[in-house]
Image (cartoon, helix red, strand yellow):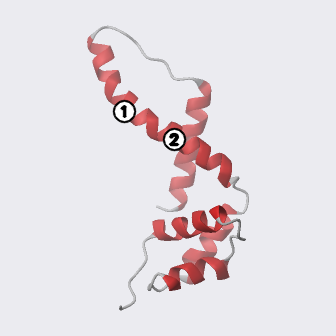
Amino acid sequence: MPSEKVDTMEYVYAALMLHKLKKEINEANIASIIKASGSESNEAKVKALVASLADVNIEEAIKAAPVAVAAAPAASGAGEAKKEGKKESETPSAKSEEQAMEGLSSLFG
């Protein structure tokens, strides 16, 4: 199988796999997972990912992720609520979680 260019999400998946297996998330381990998949890793992307995850509590980010995903269907229902004259309000914690997710996603363009 020929080597393929790896998208940024594959690097994130590699980090999540390492986290799940309770292995250290470092450059060598991420590169090993990417290589095992039959792809070439980009050293700069690996370094950027490791550096960006250094201060991230992955367990908390995983717990917050379903909240962000669950908010999407609620947004489609918001249009219906406006038609009925109802107003929906966001909680302060929902705004801060959304801002945190936007910040994390901006790292990976």
Q: Categorize mark 1 by other alpha carbons within 10 Å: few (<14), some (14-19), many (20+).
A: few
Q: Distance between the residues labelled 2 and 1?
A: 12 Å
Q: In which quarter of the image is residue 2?
A: bottom left
Residue 52: x percent and y percent? 65, 63
Q: Vertical placement of 46 versus 101: above or below?
A: below
Residue position marked by numbered label 1 in the rendering: 73
Residue 76: x percent and y percent? 32, 29
Name the kind of residue labelled 2 in the image.
Pro
Q: Categorize mark 2 by other alpha carbons within 10 Å: few (<14), some (14-19), many (20+).
A: few
Q: Earlier in the sequence, mark 2 or mark 1?
A: 2
Give the structural element (helix, strand or loop) at label 1. Answer: helix
Q: Can residue 41 be seen in this view?
A: no
Residue at figure coordinates x 28%, y 9% from the top left: 84
Considering depth in this image, is 82 or 37 the residue closer to the camera? 37
Residue at figure coordinates x 35%, y 22% from the top left: 78
Q: Which residue, as the protein is rendered here, is positioned at the far front? A: 21
- Locate residue 98 relative to residue 6 in the image: left or right: right
Residue 46: x percent and y percent? 59, 76
Considering depth in this image, is 97 or 38 the residue closer to the camera? 38
Residue 41: x percent and y percent? 51, 83
Considering depth in this image, is 17 or 79 the residue closer to the camera? 17
Residue at figure coordinates x 57%, y 23% from the top left: 91
Total tally of numbered discs in the picture: 2
Residue at figure coordinates x 40%, y 89% from the top left: 3
Q: Which residue, as the protein is rendered here, is positioned at the far top? A: 85
- Marks 2/1 in contact by CB < 8 Å: the verdict is no
Point out the image quarter for the N terminus: bottom left
Residue position marked by numbered label 2 in the rendering: 66
- Locate residue 15 relative to residue 87 in the image: left or right: right
Q: Can residue 32 be seen in this view?
A: yes
Q: Vertical placement of 28 versus 101: above or below?
A: below
